[in-house]
Image (cartoon, grey):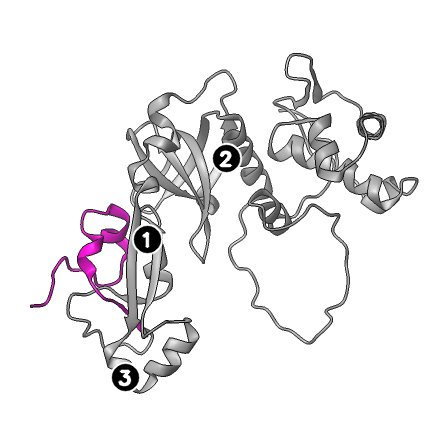
Amino acid sequence: MNKQTPKINLNSTLENFNQSQQIRIKFIDFYLFFLGKISRKELMDTFKISPAVATRDFSSYKELFGNRDWSLDTKSKSYVAEENFSPKFNHIFEDAINFLIGNNQFEVQLSHQSLILCDLPPSLIKPKIDILANISKAIFLNKPLKISYHSVSSGQSEKIIVPLALVNDGFRWHIRAFDRHKNRFSDFVLTRILSTKILFSDKATENETISNDIDWNRIVELKLLPHPNRKQQSKTIEMDFGMIDGSLDLKVRAANVGYVLQQWRVDCSSNHKIDDPAFRLCLADNLVLYGITNAEQLAPYFDKKRER
């Protein structure tokens, strides 16, 4: 078992660097941990710095932490993380995932007080940061992943998957991947993944790529309406969901449509007679879900019928 480098205190270790340099040094560590490689060009393009400054940043990273678990690949002209690479900073899941999916610019975590009074619910579902790192690295490098996974139906098992995309269903994170054991595209919840190992000597085949995932590439058009049992609330529902002319039109990937309908509590029955105040929306025509595995399993009260 590889001995991991202990995480450092950012402020005490980098006190001789200005804030811009501190951010770039942490950025190098982030890329090596979550994507497996980084080039001078990526550092230059992200922070609009010169080649000399980028070279100095990599030298500073090497001086601080050595280079036992990362090296320069002269062929790709990129610095590459070794299999035993250990991050030198404590990366936070929320910050990491937001940067990986393009929601935030990269920055060092700074503590500050809220500008206005605000209360947010605690995040109860927190995937492990090292699990996320190996998944994002496998996606970026196009490598299969050996995982230990706990499913509701079959318990714990070992699988080899080809991770393709990160997905948030509004409640939790999962990955869209090709399952080599079942020979199909499936979803895997991040918090149910107990361990991961990137198969660096292997690579994804053509049939395992996202372009061959029919449900991922198929777009389903949904028309949502205020639930007929909530007639007195219909105007409020229209305002809450930004409806136009009494309906909300959505375009959703077939692979994710069941999650959307489940999280929004959309009545997907054929007659819209579900008597539950939690269901404020209904699906205008539930036959648009026919043949979509994700929807047939998860869409609330889906019954494959159309009322005549």
Q: Which mark is residue 195?
A: 2
Amino acid type at image mark 2? Ser
Q: Is residue 284 magenta?
A: yes
Q: Percent position (x, y) of residue 126?
A: 54, 52
Q: Residues at badges 1 and 2 in contact (C-beta under 8 Å)?
A: no
Amino acid type at image mark 1? Val
Can the viewer see residue 201 in this picture?
Answer: yes
Amino acid type at image mark 3? Lys
Q: Which mark is residue 257?
A: 1
* Mark positioned earlier in the residue sequence (1 or 2): 2
Residue at x-position 45% and y-position 28%: 146
Which residue is nearer to you in this view: 86 or 225?
A: 225
Can the viewer see residue 155 in this picture?
Answer: no
Please state if 27 lies on the left or on the right of 238 as rendered.
Answer: right
* Mark positioned earlier in the residue sequence (2 or 3): 2
Q: Is residue 295 magenta?
A: yes
Assign the C terminus to one quadrant of the image: bottom left
Q: Percent position (x, y) of residue 285?
A: 20, 62
Residue bounds of the magenta highlight:
281-308
Distance from Cα at disc 3 to Cα at disc 1: 26 Å
Q: Percent position (x, y) of residue 105?
A: 67, 48
Q: Which residue is mark 3?
A: 231
| Circle 1 crowding by C-alpha within 10 Å: few under 14, some 14–19, many from 20 | many
Please state if 111 lies on the left or on the right of 305 as rendered.
Answer: right
Please state if 180 lies on the left or on the right of 62 as rendered.
Answer: left
**Above-or-below relation of 43 to 268:** above
Distance from Cα at disc 2 to Cα at disc 3: 49 Å
Q: Within the image, what quadrant is residue 163 found in?
A: top left
Q: Residue furthest top?
A: 75
Callout 2 secondary element: strand
